[in-house]
Image (spheres, rainbow, N blue to C red):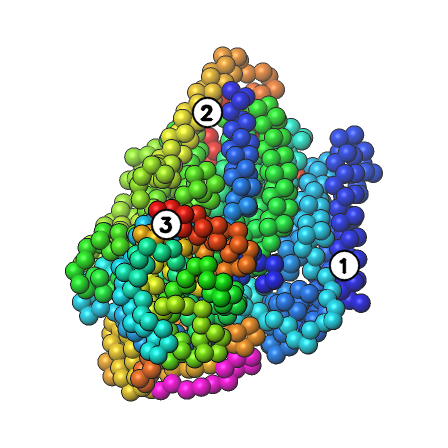
């Protein structure tokens, strides 16, 4: 791990150490880190919110499926806020205010992400236009060929092929 | 029509340029969402018999301060500890500590063994105040202005270079402001 | 001594690629048979020396030679032999070695099985393969040499990330790389065709088996990787849209598109320049994937230690390889002739639509994966693009694609009859509607998406079978006639039906897992029970058990259903000392009906333990479906026309498209 960039190494170390010293991290406080809410509707809501929040420690998992301590604390926070009656938007806003837009795994639709959200439609439109051009060229080329009569050789090859491949004609 | 065949090449070169810029960046380093904003409101208990307690009111007392988030279980905190001790001795800027997800007993032992650079310490046993600060990798160090606004954040152990090149010049500049 | 031999073998392999990359391609240009003939022995020698180097590295791992830096950093003495061997590719340097080894294997395969290829094409293909090998061998020798020694040698190594100490990891990277790197064959054939200026049905028949081989391995590799994260990461998730997963999924999407467009080239000589572009793009995405994983520009659980210097090196390789090939494409592709005419509603039309959707999905995933990086490098803003985004954009693209998959094969070439095709799919409609109703009725925690998913799965599975029934004229003539048809039907048709149905099974598994899973997350003390769906999990006790290189805290659950014993499950948390890490090890009881899944966490300090218990109905169908898809690919591969020793170029195999256009 010696060649890993400095900060990543530190974070890995912090993360690994926190895991190794799992006893030292007083998770007894974070009851709702690994405990579902009694109300299934509320739990489902909490689950959905947690799946949309990125774990700041491991960074490639949502807090819903991260073993990092901080993710556990955030799960507890989300579950408690849900239980306390906060709306999804309020909970997200609370966490975004502390960790920034970065924490949202589903970026908001705004100036900086228009390109991201509109890209799939853009790709489709560009591709459809391309296919349109392709068909036009294809037709033009076919029309040009069709305007000429078959050569004797072509006729012979076509007949032979049709005789051999009755299914394809 | 021939020009269309250059589209893939152009798109790839754009992508390669972005990847090249990307190589120079550290995508793991998160900027604090709180820069320029007031410190979160909190009121933490002290570590009994060690230092007075810490609350957000202490950070709006007209002094530039450093807030260091640490823990006795955190290995890289030990790495930066001598630097904090040296800084405390120089009396340039007061350091306040938040003991993150720690117990008063463990904090007290840690400070007794390694020295205590802090003027005030808040004991954040549950880590809720840490979340309010946007903590994601202890240790973290914040520069707080006279009016209690967060001006700068260091994630990970503070090095002598970061201290002399970034933190201290900023502290002096903020001190000079009314 | 052995590592030095490995090092020397690598240098020799590098020198051989220089020869293999120049003489044959020049020989092909000058029509010099002797120079072209260099290609085959060179490819075999390259394979020999790369294999020797790889074996030398494996040897160093097996005997724990910690004077080799790579071994010291990634292995340790007290480790089962299997993980010493898989540890070879469980790190950056070793995984690059695996990469070039597989590249050399493919090159060697062309040398051995490519006897039927025209000499010039074979020479060019092997030269292009050698260019790729040159780049990567240079990278290994200069920037990530696995044989670097350290002095003094440490007494023990740093060990392997415990997450990687798993049988799944023994097979996942080799399968993935067989796929990734296998697309280099398509790339080499495409570049050779561009140099030659000729793409014809014979070319498509030669390139398709290689694409199929790579596709099968990549499908397998992705499935293995997904299953690995399912039972190793411990939260029951099986797909995370993680950058590394995306890096393997993008070439899969492009490769799938390539597989289908190559059919059009083969049968109708159309879409030639598009197929060439796809071949280049598919391998380019493999290369970009390698870059994303190796350079560390994107963060991921799967990423190994990374070094910006190595990232820069790979980026330069990327620019030369991809930029060069796309440049060549821009110069040469316009001169490729247009193919045969077809109506929008036709087999070709459906394959074009298939390509359109697959490439759109691929482009979207590429953009989503890189968007945080692009935005940060342009404006400095930090955003994340994760599963909720990919789910939101990927599903709407896949829905029409899956709907189309049942219809497309029913359409005739050139001009199809959509109404007729839909009429023949009555059974599929009925099955989809029925499943939708049943799903709706039993919907517990799913959404309308679950209903749609189940309906699509039924549509695709039944639709694929209908296709087979139609081809065999089952129920419409005597069984004897159908049997005769069944024996004469090309294997590739069976392959298609099986692969399409396999995807249907995957979709079924995904939809079911989303709809009916039950989860219990709570604290449990020994003696307590929890109800998960119809099952009752009782925590019998928690014990400490020693492992070969770890100690584990093991929970013992007795699982019953209606009071009857079902199974005993023993999830663990393993504490490793080298490196110091704790890893959760779930207990899994897979079955076709429902997986039971248990994980145990930390103690709560008062005698209880955090546990996670899941029941996931039909989830194993996801991987079962993927295996069925691989089987389908294998069936196609066994088709006489598509075997790796396919027939030589025959001009009369199909008439020129112009003749068809006029004859039609």
Residue A85 in the image, given as x and y percentages of width and height: 16, 60
| Residue on which the image places disc 1 | C7
* Marks 2 and 3 on same chain: no
Q: Residue A134 carries which label?
A: 2
Q: In this view, does A169 lie above or below C301?
A: above
| Residue lying at 31% horizontally and 36% vertically, measured from the top left | C420
- Position of residue C370 measured from the top left corner of the image (x, y, whole percent): 46, 44
Q: Is mark 3 on a helix, strand or loop?
A: loop
Q: Give the range drawn in magenta.
A: C541-551
User: Does residue C50 appear anywhere in the picture?
Assistant: yes
User: What x and y, as percent, mark residue B131?
Assistant: 33, 61
Q: Nearer the observer, disc 1 or disc 2? A: 1
Q: Residue B35 carries which label?
A: 3
Residue C470 colored magenta? no
The residue carrying pointer 1 sits among few (fewer than 14), some (14 to 19) or many (20 or more) residues within 10 Å by Cα, namely many
For label 2, the crowd category at 10 Å Cα-Cα, with few meaning under 14, some 14 to 19 and many 20 or more, is some
| Residue under the image location 64 percent in, 60 percent down | C94
Marks 1 and 2 on same chain: no
Q: Main secondary structure of the magenta part?
A: strand
Q: SS at mark 1? A: helix
Q: In whole angstroms, how far apart are the C-alphas of marks 1 and 2?
A: 51 Å
Q: Are marks 1 and 3 in contact (CB under 8 Å)?
A: no
Q: Do labels 1 and 3 share a chain?
A: no
Query: Was residue C547 drawn as part of the magenta stretch in this picture?
Result: yes
**Marks 1/3: CA–CA distance:** 51 Å
Let me know if residue A50 appears in the view.
no
Residue at mark 2: chain: A
**Which residue ends up furthest to the right in the rendered image?**
C34
For the point 42% across and 82% down, which residue is it?
A: C554
Q: Which one is nearer the viewer's eye here, B58 or C573?
A: B58
Number of the front mark, 2 or 3: 3
User: Distance between the Cα atoms at labels 2 and 3?
Assistant: 53 Å
């Amino acid at each position: 791990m010696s060649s890993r960039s400095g900060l990543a190494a530190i974070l890995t170390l912090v993360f690994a150490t926190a895991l190794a010293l799992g006893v030292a991290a007083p998770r007894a406080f974070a009851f709702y880190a690994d405990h579902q809410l009694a109300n299934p509707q509320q739990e489902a809501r909490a689950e959905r919110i947690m799946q949309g929040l990125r774990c700041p420690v491991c960074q490639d998992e949502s807090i819903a499926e991260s073993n990092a301590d901080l993710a556990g604390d955030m799960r507890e926070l989300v579950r408690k806020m849900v239980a306390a009656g906060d709306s999804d938007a309020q909970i997200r806003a609370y966490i975004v205010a502390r960790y920034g837009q970065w924490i949202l795994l589903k970026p908001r639709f705004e100036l900086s992400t228009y390109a991201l959200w509109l890209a799939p439609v853009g790709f489709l439109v560009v591709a459809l236009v391309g296919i349109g051009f392709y068909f036009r060229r294809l037709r033009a080329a076919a029309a040009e060929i069709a305007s000429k009569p078959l050569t004797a050789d072509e006729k012979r090859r076509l007949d032979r092929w049709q005789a051999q491949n009755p299914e394809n004609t | 029509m021939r020009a269309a065949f250059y589209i893939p090449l152009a798109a790839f070169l754009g992508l390669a340029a972005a990847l090249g810029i990307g190589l120079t960046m550290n995508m793991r380093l998160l900027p604090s969402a709180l820069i320029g904003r007031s410190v979160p409101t909190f009121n933490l208990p002290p570590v009994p018999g060690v230092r007075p307690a810490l609350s957000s009111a202490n950070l709006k007392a007209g002094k530039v301060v450093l807030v260091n988030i640490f823990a006795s279980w955190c290995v890289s905190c030990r790495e930066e500890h001598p630097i904090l001790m040296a800084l405390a001795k120089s009396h340039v800027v007061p350091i306040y500590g938040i003991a993150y997800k720690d117990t008063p007993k463990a904090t007290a032992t840690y400070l007794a063994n390694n020295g205590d650079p802090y003027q005030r310490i808040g004991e954040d046993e549950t880590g809720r105040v840490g979340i309010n600060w946007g903590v994601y990798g202890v240790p973290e160090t914040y520069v707080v202005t006279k009016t209690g606004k967060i001006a700068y954040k260091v994630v990970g152990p503070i090095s002598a270079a970061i201290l002399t090149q970034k933190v201290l010049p900023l502290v002096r500049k903020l001190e000079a402001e009314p | 001594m052995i590592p030095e031999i490995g090092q020397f073998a690598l240098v020799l392999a590098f020198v051989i690629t220089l020869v293999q990359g120049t003489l044959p391609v020049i020989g092909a240009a000058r029509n010099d048979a002797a120079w072209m003939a260099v290609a085959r022995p060179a490819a075999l020698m390259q394979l020999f020396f790369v294999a020797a180097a790889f074996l030398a590295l494996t040897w160093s791992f097996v005997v724990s030679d910690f004077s080799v830096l790579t071994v010291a950093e990634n292995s340790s003495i007290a480790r089962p032999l299997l993980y010493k061997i898989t540890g070879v590719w469980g790190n950056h340097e070793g995984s690059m070695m695996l990469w070039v080894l597989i590249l050399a294997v493919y090159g060697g395969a062309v040398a051995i099985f490519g006897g039927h290829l025209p000499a010039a094409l074979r020479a060019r293909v092997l030269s292009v393969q050698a260019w790729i090998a040159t780049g990567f061998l240079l990278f290994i020798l200069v920037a990530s040499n696995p044989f670097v020694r350290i002095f003094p040698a440490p007494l023990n190594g740093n060990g392997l990330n415990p997450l990687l100490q798993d049988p799944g990891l023994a097979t996942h990277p080799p399968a993935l790389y067989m796929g990734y790197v296998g697309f280099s064959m398509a790339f080499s054939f495409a570049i050779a065709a561009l140099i030659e200026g000729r793409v014809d049905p014979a070319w498509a028949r030669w390139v398709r088996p290689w694409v199929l081989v790579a596709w099968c391995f990549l499908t397998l590799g992705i499935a293995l990787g997904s299953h690995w994260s399912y039972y190793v990461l411990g939260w029951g998730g099986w797909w995370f849209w993680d950058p590394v997963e995306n890096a393997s999924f993008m070439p899969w999407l492009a490769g799938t598109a390539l597989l289908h467009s190559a059919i059009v080239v083969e049968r109708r000589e159309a879409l030639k320049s598009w197929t060439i572009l796809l071949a280049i793009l598919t391998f380019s995405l493999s290369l970009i994937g390698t870059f994303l994983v190796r350079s560390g520009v994107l963060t991921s659980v799967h990423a190994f230690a990374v070094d910006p210097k190595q990232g820069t090196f790979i980026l330069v390789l990327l620019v030369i390889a991809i930029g060069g090939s796309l440049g060549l494409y821009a110069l040469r592709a316009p001169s490729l002739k247009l193919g045969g005419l077809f109506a929008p509603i036709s087999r070709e039309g459906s394959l074009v639509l298939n390509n359109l959707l697959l490439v759109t999905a691929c482009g979207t995933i590429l953009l989503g994966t890189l968007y945080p990086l692009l935005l940060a490098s342009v404006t400095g803003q930090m955003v994340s693009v994760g599963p909720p985004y990919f789910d939101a954009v990927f599903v709407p693209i896949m829905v029409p694609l899956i709907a189309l998959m049942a219809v497309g094969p029913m359409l005739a070439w050139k001009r199809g009859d959509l109404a007729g095709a839909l009429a023949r799919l009555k059974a599929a409609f009925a099955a989809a509607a029925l499943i939708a109703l049943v799903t709706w009725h039993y919907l517990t925690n799913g959404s309308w998406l679950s209903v749609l998913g189940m309906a699509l799965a039924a549509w695709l599975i039944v639709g694929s079978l209908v296709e087979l029934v139609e081809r065999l004229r089952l129920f419409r003539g005597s069984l004897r006639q159908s049997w005769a048809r069944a024996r004469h039907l090309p294997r590739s048709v069976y392959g298609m039906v099986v692969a399409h149905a396999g995807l249907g099974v995957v979709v079924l598994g995904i939809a079911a897992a989303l709809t009916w899973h039950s989860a219990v997350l709570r604290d449990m003390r020994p003696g307590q029970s929890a109800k998960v769906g119809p099952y009752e999990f009782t925590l019998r006790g928690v014990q400490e058990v020693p492992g070969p290189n770890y100690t584990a805290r093991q929970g013992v659950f007795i699982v019953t259903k209606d009071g009857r014993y079902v199974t005993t499950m023993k999830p663990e948390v393993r504490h490793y000392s080298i490196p110091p890490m704790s890893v959760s090890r779930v207990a899994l009881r897979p079955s076709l009906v429902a997986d039971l899944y248990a994980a145990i966490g930390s103690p709560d300090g008062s005698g209880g333990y955090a546990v996670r218990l899941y029941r996931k109905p039909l989830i194993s169908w996801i991987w079962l479906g993927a295996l069925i898809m691989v089987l389908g690919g294998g069936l196609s591969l066994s088709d006489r026309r598509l075997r790796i020793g396919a027939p030589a170029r025959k001009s009369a195999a199909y008439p020129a498209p112009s003749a068809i256009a006029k004859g039609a």
